[in-house]
Amino acid sequence: MLIDSHAHISDEKFDSDRQDVIARAYDNDVKYIIEVGCDPNEWDKVLEISKNQNIFSMFGIHPHDAIKFNIETKTKLEILLQDKKCVAVGEIGLDYHYDLSPRDVQKNVFIEHIKLATKLNKPVCIHCRSAYSDMLKILKELKELPKGVIHCFSGNLDEAKQVLDMGFLLGIDGPCTYPKSDKLKEVVAKTDIDKLLIETDCPYLAPQAYRGQRNEPSYVVEIAKKISEIKNVPFEEVCKITTDNTIKLFKLGI
Ligand SMILES: [Zn+2]
């Protein structure tokens, strides 16, 4: 059994065949999906999708949309985070690659979310792109840290060590299957499987076998295959350990 620990099947790219996509995941042993609602405009849709028995949810405001964080959205977010299918606060963090919200706003909203996670005793799912030094600085300055995952990890080995030391796990996605991802492959090779989660981040980042196409939860199998190859650990063991890691971090009642 596998779990896609980070998916966006609420994306309109799945509007025409969402049920088929969920069924195909199930048929490929991807028994559960954690669906991410990270834009206030999509929260209701994600809540609806998470009513499916094989789908869990997480809610938050993506750094791209950090400017949408206000009293109103914060209040709604607190309610959503207490939904029985909601297992985490996310995805939240910093994105200096696109800079779609001002950096100061991104930082403040990131901190607000972490405080909310600590208050509600939920893990966090952190998105960090081209902002590792600021993310590490923020996390180190916080008095209390939740558990969590650095989703779609894209840092170097030293940055991986720093977040692992703080108790976070690393989310591994399609890029580990790309021919030019030597830095990520090194991180995977040198990190204990106990610290890895597998995820698709679909519809983005399709693994090499499907590159250029829409990504979907059933393709998380490709990530497990690649980790098995990089670490020279049997495929079944990679599936079992990463699934257990996901169940434990998100306290999935399955
Ligand atoms: Zn995502």
Image (cartoon, grey):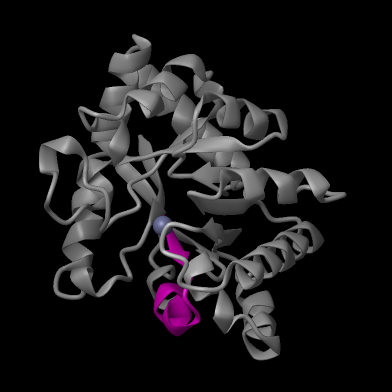
At 44% from the left and 84% from the top, the residue drawn is 41
Magenta stretch encompasses residue 35: yes
Residue 149 position within the rendered picture, expressed as x and y whole percent measured from the top left: 57, 43
Magenta residues span 34-47
- Determine the residue located farthest toward the bottom in the rendered image: 72
- Determine the residue located farthest toward the top in the rendered image: 232
Task: Please state, as top left, top right, bottom left or bottom right, where the N terminus lies in the image.
Answer: top left
Quarter occupied by residue 182: top left
Asked whether the viewer can see residue 26, the reply is: no
At 43% from the left and 68% from the top, the residue drawn is 50
At 56% from the left and 58% from the top, the residue drawn is 94
Query: On screen, 155 above or below 83?
Result: above
Query: On screen, 59 above or below 67?
Result: above
Quarter occupied by residue 80: bottom right
Q: Quadrant of ligand 1?
A: bottom left
> Considering depth in this image, is 123 or 175 the residue closer to the camera?
175
Q: Is residue 177 left or right of residue 48?
A: left
Query: On screen, 164 above or below 114?
Result: above
Q: Is residue 51 left or right of residue 216?
A: right
Q: Is residue 10 left or right of residue 113?
A: left
Residue 82 position within the rendered picture, expressed as x and y whole percent measured from the top left: 66, 70
> Considering depth in this image, is 166 or 4 the residue closer to the camera?
166
Residue 160 position within the rendered picture, expressed as x and y whole percent measured from the top left: 57, 30
Magenta stretch encompasses residue 130: no
Q: Is residue 231 left or right of residue 213?
A: right
Asked whether the viewer can see residue 223, the reply is: yes
Count of all numbered marks drawn on residues in the image = 0
Residue 42 position within the rendered picture, expressed as x and y whole percent measured from the top left: 42, 79
